[in-house]
Image (cartoon, rainbow, N blue to C red):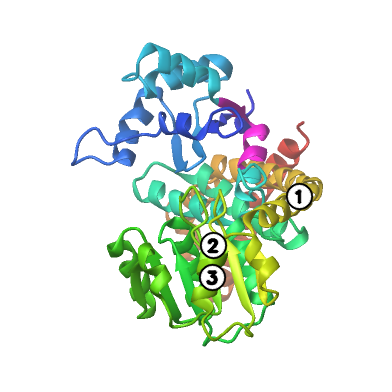
Amino acid sequence: MKAIEQYKIITFTHRRTDLNGIGQFVLRPKTEEESVLEQLHAFKQQIGAKEIYYLSTCNRILFLVLAQKEDKGKAFKQKFMQTLYADLSEALQAKALKEAFLYEGLEAIDHFFRVSASMDSLVVGEREILRQLREAYQDNLEQGLTGDAIRLLMRFTVETAKRVYSSTRIGEKPVSVVSLAVSKLMQAQLPPSSRFLLLGAGQTNALFAKFLKKYGYHKVTVFNRSLKKAQELAQDFDGEGLLLSQLGEYRKGFDVVVAATGAKSALLTTELYGQLLGEEAASSKLLIDLSIPNNIEPAIAEQYPKAQYIPIESLRELAQKNLAFREQELERAKEVVEEQVDIFYQAFKERLIELALREVPIQVKAIRQHALNNVFKKELADLDEESLALLDRMMAYMEKRCIAIPLQVAKQNMLKED
């Protein structure tokens, strides 16, 4: 078995397991005092792993393992899963064994690189995964779970992700409806003094509000079924939080309405829109509807020419086009990853040589000192300073050559393999 095959990945992803199903296999603390990473120490010893790395995200659970040489294939996967999930029911253990992917050797390296560059993500090109990988590595490292082999891989992993993003367009064109809605907003080039009405204070509008703050918009009023949530979101802007039932009474004017609630019918009707307009009928308005079904009545744009209506359907169509564009870039990204896998493999083999021969310099230096201080001590005592200096330079030269030769020979022989 080649040393590179000790790298193994066992992972649950959106490609084979639904998101709720992935949650069944997330590791959880068994006690309040013990963390998941601390638990992994015991598991690492149970399966005899040299190093282990654990990552858990909303659509992925990944174990990167440096295994013993005798551990391989389906037998290793079965041993891994049965040990890790010993507390689960037999049905869930069987499900875990069936749905988990196993990658070994260079395939594991290739998969890890693809994950880092968001080529295997639910949303291709989202850069968040690289941050998650790095943070997880730091946590695993601090717990003493990882060592030299995973350290080397992480260095090349970060380099690979950066190369993919810099040499392809895989991360271009937003694909989330909120990002696309913000892009539409920025195209309108509205001044920072623009007035925003947010209908709903859930996750969608909370995310939209973060973008508003980022781009300097500060006049925000939030309407929500829960007054408390409306006020909490509005306080980030020193704005006002009101109940949705108060929308018909609002007369302070607006420039943009962003709707994102779970209502089953339109909240902003043509009639209500007319009431909100008041004396501003001649002013341009932007209406962004991020709800299904629509929270803003489409007929508003027909009756009021100054109202620009952006429904979620148009944003989702654009998101699909942008996602298709990103997926076209996958082929170029694959080429980068393949190159990086080859580069990593050479670096890995050289590192093995360095580790195997790290005692050579120490032993050569020890032989030199023994010769000077013991074997030839009497003869050296009769030499003058100039002769001793010359001898020291000669010994230093021979020492370097004696260290370099076995390193060079070993590298040449190993690099000829495969």
Nearer to me, 160 or 166? 166
Q: Which mark is residue 269?
A: 2
Nearer to me, 241 or 93? 241
Does the magenta segment cover residue 377? Answer: no
Tags 1 and 2 touching, CB below 8 Å = no
Label 3 – label 2 distance at C-alpha? 6 Å
Q: Which mark is residue 273?
A: 3
Of callouts 3 and 1, the N-terminal one? 3
**In the rendered image, is residue 391 in sight?**
no
Label 1 – label 2 distance at C-alpha? 47 Å
Q: Single out the mark in the foreground, 1 or 2.
A: 2
Q: Tell me the crowding category of disc 3: few under 14, some 14 to 19, or many 20 or more residues within 10 angstroms, Cα based.
A: some
| Secondary structure state at the residue bearing disc 1 | helix
Left or right of 388 on screen, residue 87: left
Q: Quadrant of the N terminus?
A: top right
Nearer to me, 96 or 106? 96
Residue 171, position as x, y percentages in the image:
69, 58
Left or right of 112 on screen, residue 26: left
Of callouts 1 and 2, the N-terminal one? 2
For residue 172, which quarter of the picture?
A: bottom right
Residue 295, position as x, y percentages in the image:
53, 57
Q: Is residue 168 above or below residue 82?
A: below
Q: Which mark is residue 333?
A: 1
Q: Amino acid at mark 3?
A: Tyr
Tags 3 and 2 touching, CB below 8 Å = yes
Residue 275, position as x, y percentages in the image:
50, 74
Q: Amino acid at mark 1?
A: Ala
Q: Tell me the crowding category of disc 2: few under 14, some 14 to 19, or many 20 or more residues within 10 angstroms, Cα based.
A: some
| Secondary structure state at the residue bearing disc 3 | helix
Nearer to me, 167 or 188? 188
- The residue stretch that appears in magenta: 101-112
| Secondary structure state at the residue bearing disc 2 | loop
